[in-house]
Amino acid sequence: MTAPHRSGFACFVGRPNTGKSTLTNALVGSKVAITSSKPQTTRHAIRGIVQRPDAQLIIVDTPGLHRPRTLLGQRLNDVVRATWSEVDVVGFCVPANEKIGPGDRFIAAELAKLSRHTPIVGVVTKTDAATKNQIADQLVALQEVMSFTDLIPVSAVDGFQVEQLSDVLVSRLPEGPRLYPDGELTDEPEATLIAELVREAALEGVRDELPHSIAVTVEEITEREDRDDMLDIWANLYVERDSQKGIVLGHKGERLKSVGATARRQIEALLGSKVYLHLHVKVAKDWQRDPKQLRRLGF
Ligand SMILES: Nc1nc2c(ncn2[C@@H]2O[C@H](COP(=O)(O)OP(=O)(O)OP(=O)(O)O)[C@@H](O)[C@H]2O)c(=O)[nH]1
């Protein structure tokens, strides 16, 4: 009897520089390609898809969890937690060659709340950069921070146990068919979050005039061909009536310009990349009362 096919979502969490991206690439097996096709099953950014004969493992991205200092910081943390609670398995990454610190403990405390519903796999990364004793000590130390369903040391650089990690993650997925067509590797950056940032900026100062009339869609995100540190983002800002369009645009479009500038700065902070924001205002008549429009706007 062959094993049932499994499919589902995983994400890696951990302090910056703990090797999450490199590990994702090692698991996926080739550089993550960017396609424009929008996944239907998740609103989160897809980092890569591990295609195996027996399983499809979709690795999603989360922005880092921070000690929140601002409302936006709290919002971002909410997004992170929402992602964690929607995946089938979480990998908590801690490098073998660095002492476990307060940053790791902060994340572990958050993850512990999740562990009743979601399996958490402890991943000791960068084993190639540590001695056998260091690795053993780190496994013990990590186990003392919180309890895991599995604990595994890996190296994305020399490939040590990458296959085994893939097996462990897959074993935690539910049975199910492929969710994406073969060969499709998708990377949808935080489109939902970007739309939220634009909406926030647009509502600043005019909340009373445009209570709930604004919706934002992110139509496309592309990398500039001639430079890899610049993203072009096309977003539409929908209002319900022509009169509201004037409010959003402001005198000679000045208001929209400043909304765009505010949103751009926040998006750049979020993505860690320079951004050119192409922002267009459109009227979608009475969209709040039109189910078809609502669906199109992501509600
Ligand atoms: N020696 C060694 N270095 C690694 C390994 N994996 C990642 N690195 C290095 O560690 C650094 C951080 O790796 P990333 O994969 O970018 O880490 P990350 O956790 O995704 O970082 P953030 O995006 O900042 O959260 C890079 O310089 C990598 O080359 C590994 O298995 N062994």
Image: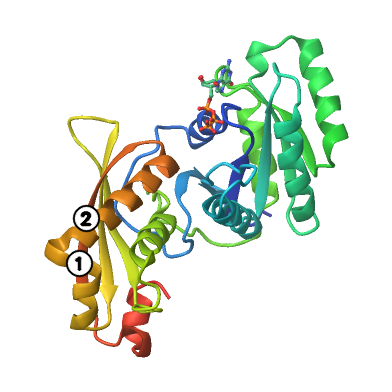
Tag 2 near tag 1, CB within 8 Å: yes
Pick whichever, 270 or 170, lies toward us.
270
Q: Quadrant of residue 98?
A: top right
Q: Position of residue 10 (x, y in %)?
A: 60, 48
Can you say which quadrant of the picture contains the C terminus? Answer: bottom left
Q: Secondary structure at mark 2?
A: helix
- Give the answer, above or below, for where 248 lies relative to 235: below
Pick whichever, 190 or 278, lies toward us.
278
Q: Residues within 10 Å of mark 2 (few under 14, many from 20)?
A: some
Which mark is on residue 257?
2
Question: Which residue corresponds to the image point at 78% horizontal and 45% vertical from the top-left?
Answer: 109
Q: CA gap, disc 2 to disc 1?
A: 9 Å
Which mark is on residue 250?
1
- Give the answer, above or below, for where 159 lies relative to 294: above
Question: Which residue corresponds to the image point at 69% horizontal and 38% vertical from the top-left?
Answer: 92
Residue located farthest toward the top when viewing the structure as drawn: 131
Question: Which residue corresponds to the image point at 29% horizontal and 52% vertical from the top-left?
Answer: 36
Which mark is on residue 102?
none
The amino acid at mark 1 is Gly
